Image (spheres, grey):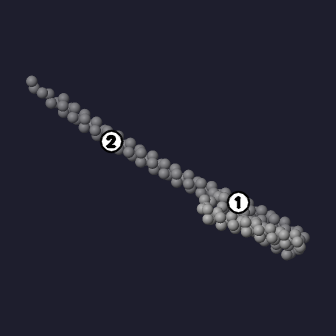
Amino acid sequence: MPLNYDKYYDFGDEVKSFLVNSETEFKSFENYYHLQSKIKEKEKELSEVLKDQTKRNIELLGIFSAIIALLYQGATAANSEIPFPDKILTFFLMFITLISFLILLKSIVSKSYFRERTFILFTIISLILISSIIIILIVIK
């Protein structure tokens, strides 16, 4: 009984084409996986950039609003009939308030370590104490 080898050659070709097709699909899935991981990395980077920009915008908005309040208060104090030394003390007090506000804003918005926060807290407390002393001196006069 003669054997029909043509059937086996066709079967071998089908197996080879199936293996080539499977390998191509595997490479396609691998490329898809790498593409997906790159997209996730870019998404994380963009979210961090957006968070940083939001913090910067909050800081800038706080700085500009504090400066506008300082200018408004300065114009009001300059036009009043208060003696000149009291005006200087008022301006000094306003600048101390502005600096403490900016330091407080920076400590709230930034990701500081414990040491830096302790330093900022110490600075704010000292500025408040200086402001209180100046207010007491103004009241005593």
Image quarter where the N terminus lies is top left
| Residue type indicated by callout 1 | Gly
In the drawing, what numbered circle is on residue 24?
Answer: 2
Point 63% across, 55% down: residue: 54
- Of badges 1 and 2, the one in the foreground is 1
Left or right of 135? Residue 36 is: left
Q: Which residue is mark 1?
A: 62
Quarter of the image for residue 23 reads top left
Distance from label 1 to label 2 (Cα)? 57 Å
Q: Is residue 60 visible?
A: no
- Left/right placement of residue 55 relative to residue 136 reads left
At which x and y percent is residue 140? 88, 71
Q: Describe the element under mark 1 as helix, strand or loop.
A: helix
Q: Residue at x 68, y 64 (%)?
A: 121
Q: Residue furthest bottom?
A: 85
Q: Nearer the viewer, residue 2 or 141?
A: 141
Displayed quadrant of residue 101: bottom right
Q: Residue at x 28, y 40 (%)?
A: 20
Q: Which mark is residue 21?
A: none
Inspect the image, locate mark 2, and give the three-letter code of the amino acid beneath it: Thr
Q: Position of residue 13 (x, y in %)?
A: 22, 35
Say what secondary structure mark 2 lies in.
helix
Up/down of 47 relative to 29, above or below: below
Looking at the image, the residue that sits furthest to the left is: 1
**Direction from residue 23 to residue 42 in the image, left or right:** right
**Residue 109 visible at all:** yes
